[in-house]
Amino acid sequence: MKAEGGDHSLINLSVQQVLSLWAHGTVLRNLTGAAVAGIYRVAGKNMAPLEALVWGVGQTVLTLIISFSRILATL
């Protein structure tokens, strides 16, 4: 006899891993964005819209690279 729910455990673990990576990536992105904004405020600099775009795109790309490498490490 099969254990109940045992055949869905791989799917459950996969979904939990993806949600965990997404949640941690979101928190990390928000914290790094706040850190960059804090540094600019302490330095007394104004951030131009293009500069903010470059920082945001850079953080997103870096988060995607780190997340993708973590998924590859589990395979």
Image (cartoon, helix red, strand yellow):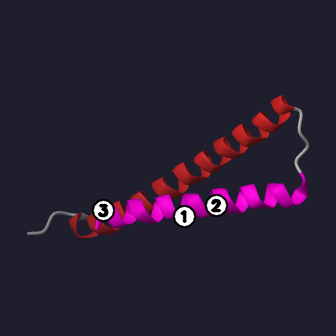
Where residue 53 sits, quadrant-wise, is: bottom right
Where residue 12 sits, quadrant-wise, is: bottom left
Give the amino acid type for the residue marked by disc 3 in the picture.
Thr
Tag 1, which secondary structure? helix
2 and 1 marks in contact (CB < 8 Å): yes
Image location of residue 10, percent across then percent down: 28, 67
Tag 2, which secondary structure? helix
Residue carrying label 1: 64
What residue is at 45 percent from the left and 62 percent from the top? 18
Which of the pair 55/30 is nearer the observer?
A: 55
Q: CA distance from mark 1 to mark 3?
A: 16 Å
1 vs 3, front mark: 1
Q: CA distance from mark 2 to mark 1?
A: 6 Å
Mark earlier in primary sequence (1, 3): 1
Residue carrying label 2: 60
Question: How many numbered dots are placed on residues in this image?
Answer: 3
Tag 3, which secondary structure? helix
Q: Which mark is residue 74?
A: 3
1 and 3 marks in contact (CB < 8 Å): no
What residue is at 76 percent from the left and 60 percent from the top? 54
What residue is at 89 percent from the left and 57 percent from the top? 49
Q: Which mark is residue 12?
A: none
3 and 2 marks in contact (CB < 8 Å): no
Give the amino acid type for the residue marked by disc 2 in the picture.
Thr
Which of the pair 47/28 is nearer the observer?
A: 47
As drawn, is 73 to the left or to the right of 32?
Answer: left
Residue 33 counted in the magenta span:
no
As drawn, is 16 to the left or to the right of 34?
Answer: left
Mark earlier in primary sequence (3, 2): 2
Which residues lie in the magenta part?
Answer: 48-75
Image location of residue 41, percent across then percent down: 84, 34
